[in-house]
Image: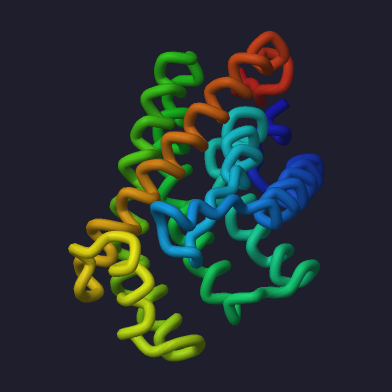
Amino acid sequence: MQNSNKLLSTQNIIKMAFLSAIAAILMQWGIKLPAIFPSFLEIDFSEVPALVAILTINPWAGIVVVVIKNLLKGLLFGSSTGYVGELANMLISIGYVLPLTLVVRKSKEMRHITKGIIGGIFGIMITGAIVNYFITIPLYAQVFMPMETIIEIGHAIIPAVTDKFTLVMLSITPFNLVKGTLVAVASVAFIKALQPALKYLMPKKAA
């Protein structure tokens, strides 16, 4: 029983690989909302398998799934963003799952899980703002298009966007709020549906 609690036991590695593959596939099904957000932003639900990993494998398994899903996505499907999108997704997804990871280490009750997911919404907003401002947008500007063009894409939707800071605060941060909320709702709904089986799937602490 103690071995099943180890993050890198053989059984857990297989489970994390399976969930990572599902997450990589979900990354391919991104949803664009071009009427209200820049076209380079997509909503996907690839964090849901990471959440399942946290609850059924090990509190830190979600971060492993987040990292592996981006590696698999790049290896299996390639990248249309020069791997800038995958790097951003990995860092921002960690910002989403980390609050839940910290909560689940102490309690797996549904009310605490819900608090952890709500914390993840704030995590994805804060991490998303930092990652996009300092990493993603500058890399996009180097690899794909000038910074002025990126800002103009945001300005065309929200006239108040006039520079990198306002692009992050008025466009990307609201996007991550919407994405975090949708992922949270989907995650809570999935966990509630799975709840009867969770007591059998969750690893038990050794005596």
Residue appearing at x 77%, y 41% in the figure: 15
x, y percentage for residue 13?
75, 48
Q: Nearer the viewer, residue 91 or 61?
A: 91
Task: Give coordinates of residue 39: x percent, y percent.
Answer: 49, 64
- 112 is higher (above) or lower (below) than 91: above
Apparent side of residue 119 relative to residue 18 in the rendered image (left or right): left
- Relative image position of residue 106 (x, y in whole percent): 42, 25
Looking at the image, what colour scheme do you see?
rainbow
Quadrant of the image for the C terminus?
Answer: top right
Q: Residue at point 64% right, 62% down?
A: 70
Extreme residue toward the top, this view: 196
Residue drawn at 23 percent across, 64 percent down:
159
Place residue 204 in its image quadrant: top right
The vertical placement of 201 against 32, above or below, is above
Q: Is residue 14 left or right of residue 135?
A: right
Residue 98 visible in the snapshot = yes
Total numbered badges shown on the rendered structure = 0
Is residue 61 at least partly visible in the picture?
no
For residue 205, which quarter of the picture?
A: top right
In the displayed structure, 145 sits above or below 186; it is below
Point 66% across, 25% down: residue: 203
| Residue 206 picture location, percent across and down | 62, 23
The image quadrant that residue 48 belongs to is top right
Q: Nearer the viewer, residue 179 or 64?
A: 179
Which of these two is toward me, 75 or 183? Answer: 183
In the image: residue 55, left or right of residue 73: left
* In-image side of 123 versus 197 (left or right): left
**In which quadrant of the rendered image does the N terminus lie?**
top right
